[in-house]
Image: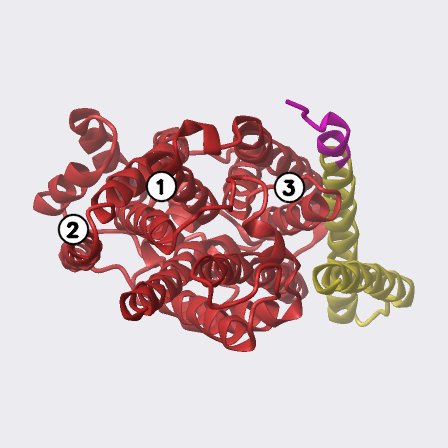
Amino acid sequence: MKIDWAALGSVFGVSLVITVALVALFTLGIMGLSRRERAAVQGASATLAVTGAYACFAACAAAVAYGISLIVA
Amino acid sequence: MESFSLILAIVVITALVFDFTNGFHDTANAMATTISTGALKPKVAVAMSAVLNLVGAFLSVEVANTISKGLVDETGIRPEVIFAALVGAILWNLATWLVGLPSSSSHALMGGLIGATIASAGVGAVHGDVLVTKVLIPAIAAPIVAGLAAMLATRLSYTLGKKADGKAAAKGYRTGQIASAGLVSLAHGTNDAQKTMGIITLALVAGGAVAPDSDPPLWVILSAGLAIALGTYFGGWRIIRTMGKGLTDLEPQQGFAAQTSAATVILASSHLGFSLSTTHSVSGSVMGAGLGRKGGVVRWSTATRMFVAWGLTLPAAALVAALAEYVTGFGNWGTALVAVFLVASSAAIWKISRREIIDHTNVVDVSEEPPGVVTAAIAAVTPPPVGTVTEDLTATISAPVAESAPPATTSV
């Protein structure tokens, strides 16, 4: 019986890193958007936060696209 | 020849029925968190999942081509063996659906195949080491991997996102959940619809209708995709309720973290060559997300019942399949007897389920009916000792009533 511990280990590592990274990016993106919301209430603008937010969401979208490419392949 | 093609037709139909039960059993994997956090309306969620399952079924035939190879020796498999295997798998899927427990449809199918093969060709025809590496270890590893990832992600998301509030945050988490749930549905379609395609192809090869080593014919792909999509749309609301509400109470952030973790684990594992079961990954990540929030709780009584069901899936499906295979051995009337038994017990399970209807209208509501006859009836078909289960069941049904403040639209 041969258990592929290396494959299991890499599944563990990769899943952990990607999940945490994606959720962190997404949360930062949402932070940026809420900052804009707050800024809008005060009449200020939050260009930097919004740009950062969209960069974060773009990274998440790229990850989803990569996921779809993995499914199709 | 005539009876030969008849048994083949029966196998194909039974396989499609299994595919249907697979669909409605596993809707919960993709959509339970999305429904319970209110990101999508129940009907919209299952419709989306059904479409993505159908699309996924057409994306590749790789899984279908490998399903039959490895676990059992396919030489000398008769269509009756596959029929018996499917009977075991379908009945187990229906029984776990009745009690609302998520369990792996793949394990049920493998269990069925193993049981029927043992009854037909003896213990030697089953590869024991494949059983350990492909079934046992993934079943233990999946919830741990997905659970840890979801727990860390949830914790991080609450720490980072303290200031995330308002409409933007609510909308954002909603979109994120829909995207990750969509990925899970798509991956499910490619994996599970193809398992049925593999089975049907295996039966066609065994029956001599298709040359060995050929790809599944188009009508097989089409009908398998449609069967799983229909099943998904039908919705296994009982399991959705357990997964989305029974195990823990999820806020949108947790739902997002759980679904992202599940999607990542499923894709990473199948890509890196150590396939982990969808059901186990999603259940694990839901529990992890529950533990990751401060003050979050996992209802361990429900979780324990689920773990017991996981442990029983393979042996139970194997036992039923072995019995079915034994009876089909008596010839055509034996096969007919098994078919009648399958239809009758499915009908009985359906009938019992109608005593307490759970559908898209009440899937996220708490149950207000006092547990009585229904609980007893459900407990009677639950595998573990009846006495303790009744208590557990009562506990899990009445627990949400006590804390019925709906967290569905809570923002941070």
Any mark on residue A54, and which?
A: none
Query: Same subunit under labels 2 and 3?
Result: yes
Please say if B374 is above or below B195: above
The magenta segment: A1-10
Q: Which of marks 3 and 1 is in front?
A: 1
Residue type indicated by callout 2: Glu
Q: Which residue is drawn at 49% across and 53% down?
A: B29
Chain coloured yellow: which letter?
Answer: A
| Near-viewer residue (B253 or A31) | B253
Q: Name the secondary structure under disc 2.
A: loop
Residue B142: percent from left, percent from top: 59, 36
| Near-viewer residue (A72 or B250) | A72
Q: Read off the residue under disc 1.
A: B116
Chain coloured red: which letter?
Answer: B
Lower position in the chain sequence, tag 2 or tag 3: 3
Q: Name the secondary structure under disc 3.
A: helix
Viewed as shown, does residue B18 lie left or right of B193?
A: left
Q: Read off the residue under disc 2.
A: B369
Q: Read off the residue under disc 3.
A: B154
Residue type indicated by callout 3: Thr
Residue type indicated by callout 1: Ala
Report the residue that reaches farthest toward the top. Answer: A1
Viewed as shown, does residue B376 lie left or right of B118?
A: left
Residues packed near mark 1 inside 10 Å, few (<14), some (14 to 19) or many (20 plus): many
Query: Same subunit under labels 2 and 1?
Result: yes
Residue B304: percent from left, percent from top: 38, 29
Q: Circles 3 and 1: CB distance less than 8 Å?
A: no
Residue B319 visible in the shown view: yes
Q: Is B323 a magenta residue?
A: no
